[in-house]
Amino acid sequence: MAEALVRLRDLQVRFGGVPALRGVDLEIARGEAIGLVGESGSGKSVTWLASLGLLPPTARTTGSVMLGDTELLGAAPATLDDVRGGRIAMIFQDPATALNPVQRVGRQVVEALQLHRGMDEAAAWAEAKRLFELVGIPDPARRIQVYPHEMSGGQNQRVMIAMALAGQPELLVADEPTTALDATIQAQILDLLRRLQAELNMALVLISHDLGVVADMCSRVAVMYAGRIVEQAETANLFEHPAHPYTQGLLGALPDMVGPRRRLSAIPGSVPEPWNLPAGCAFGPRCDRHGPDCDIQPDFVTIAPGHVTACVRAAA
Amino acid sequence: MSLLELRDAAQSYTTRRGLLGRASQVRAVDGISLHVEPGQTLGVVGESGCGKSTTGRLMLGLERPSDGTVLFEGQPMPAPGTPEWRHLRRRMQLVFQDPLGAMDRRLTIAQQVEEPLIIHGIGTAEERRARVAQLLVDVGLRADQAARHPHELSGGQRQRAVLARALATDPALLVCDEPVSALDVSIQAQVVNMLTDLQAARGIAMVFISHDLKVVRQVSHRVAVMYLGRIVEQGDPEALFADPIHPYTQALVSAIPVPGPRRIKRIVLTGDPPNPANRPTGCAFHPRCQMAISRCAVETPQLLTQPDGRDVACHLSEPQARMAA
C-alpha cells in the first residue's frame, strides 16, 4: 500500500468493562476512500470517536492511532485540537443537530476558518463563500447569511461539508452522511463527496450501514461485526467473492433491484449484546457453518492480495 | 371488487408561516386514485413531503379527504371516531416505523397484543390468552418474551410485537408506514420475509409505504410512485423499476446505490425536493426535470395508461408525444 496516512493498531474501547471495540487494525492511505460497514453497535462510529479522543471519560481506550508520525491516543489536548477539524474532519448523519441553530451558517464556517487557518474576519468570509460555492450551494453570497432552519436537510449537510473542509483536512470521516436524506438528495451529496475527494486528494472514511452506498463510493471496504473487523478487501472483490459468512449474509439479505425476485436469505437471530458475547467468533451463534473450532477467536487469513478475513472456514 | 379504493382523493391542510404569517392551504395529497386488492400488496414510494403518509391516513379513515372519496369494500369510509368507523378499524390496522413509539412502555408484550382484542370485545379471557400466544408464535417471538416490556426487546423483536398486535383482530388490510426503515439489514430481511409469509398464510392486503425502493420492489404486487401529492407512475414493480418511464421515477431508480456494476446512468437531480406549500405550475416536477418542455410548465399531465398497462403522468409519454418523438 502507498504511504499510510492513518494507522490503527489493536484499537480497543471498553465502556465500564463492557467491550465496544475489540481490537481494530486499519490502515488508510493518502487520498484513499475506504468504507466501513456494519450494523448498529458494530463499532464503526466508536472507532473514529475513540481515534479522535471524542469519547466520554468513562471509556477506556487502548491500542494505537498514528496520524503520520503523531500518536493520537493519549495525546495532549492541544495536539488533538489541531488534528480535530484540522487534519481530520468528521461529518455526521444529522446536520440539523450538528449545526448551531441560533447562528448564521456562514458565521459557523468562518469560526472554523479562524480557528484552523488563523484567517482574519474579511479573509474568512471570502473563503467561506468560496467553500459554499465548492460544495454546490446556490447563491452563496446570500445563503451564507441564513440560519440552519431556513435550509433543507441536503443544504445543511453541504454546510457541514463546507465546515469540514475549512481546516483543509487530509482525512474526512463521514458517519452515515446521507442516511437522513431522501434518495435524490443522497445522490447529490454522494456525488459531491466523490468530486471533493478526487479534487482535493483527501482520504475519505465512509461509515454506512448501506452496502450500496459504500460500493458506489469506496475502493476498499472493511466489514465490522460486534466490535471487530471481520473482512477487508477491495470493493469489487468483497462484493463478488465475499469470504466471511457474515458478509455473505449481509449481501444475501439485501433485496435486488433487477432480475426475478427471490426470498431474502435473512441472517437468523440478532447481534449479540456486548456484555454477553459468545466465546470465539462473535458471529458463531448465527452462522450456518459454525463448528467447535469456531470457539477460539479466529485469526485473519489472507485469501487474495489485499483480501483478509477472520474466519476459520474462509480458506476452504 | 377492490378491498380499498381511493377516488380522486385530496387532502389540504392549513399552515401558517411564522407566528403572524398568513394562513395558506397546503395540498398534501392532490387528487389520487388507487386501489388495493384483497391479499395483494400496494407499494407507495416517494420522498419526504410527497404525501405518502397522508395517503396512508386517508386509507385508514384516520382523516377524511377534503375532496374525493375513500371506499372500503365498495362502501364509503365512515367518519373517524364514529361507531361504524371503530367497528371497521378491526379490519384495517397500521404499523409504523418506530415500534418503541407505537408501544406502551409500561405494558408487557402480551398485554399490548391483547389490548385490541379487549377493545373490540373479542373472545373470553381464556381465548384471548391462547390467541395472544399463537400470534406471538406467528411473528416469531418466543413464549418467554410475552412477559417482557418493550425496552427489553431489540428493534426487530419490537417490530414483530407491533405486528402481532396489528394482526390480533385478523385484519383484511395492513397499512405499513416505513415498517423496516429503522431496522438493520439482516433484521430487515427477517421482517420482510415474515410479512410475505403472513400475507401468504392469511391473505392480508397490504399497503407498504416506504422510501426504500429495493424493499418495496421485494414485497409489492403493484407500485405507485408519488411526487408532491400526486401519483406520477404506477404499475408492476419489476417492469416499473427495470424500465421507469416518468423522468422522476428514472431519477429515483438511478439514485439507488447498488453493490456491483451500475446498470443505468445515474441521474442526479438538481435542486431540493419541492415544498408542497409552493407547488410549481403545470407538472410539479418540471423545475427539476431534464426533459421538460414548455408545455410542462403550464399544463398538468394526466395519469394515462401506457401500452404495457402501467399508468404514467408525463406529457412526454403521452401517445401523440411518443409518435412525434
Image (spheres, grey):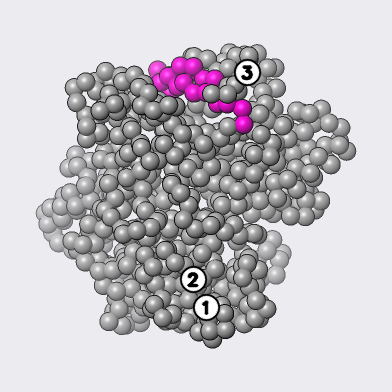
**Cα–Cα gap, marks 2 and 1:** 7 Å
Judged left or right of residue B216, residue A96 is: right
Secondary element at image label 1: helix
Q: Chain of mark 1?
A: B
A247 in the magenta segment: no
Q: Chain of mark 2?
A: B
Identify which amino acid the numbered label 1 is placed on.
Answer: Ser
Whether residue B135 appears in this view of the structure is yes
Going from the N terminus, do you reach mark 2 or mark 1 first?
2
Compared to A210, does B75 lie above or below?
below
Disc 1 target residue: B317
Q: Position of residue A178 (x, y in %)?
A: 55, 46
Numbered circle sitting on residue B245: 2
**Cα–Cα gap, marks 2 and 3:** 51 Å
A13 in the magenta segment: yes
Point out the stretch of residues depicted in magenta: A7-31
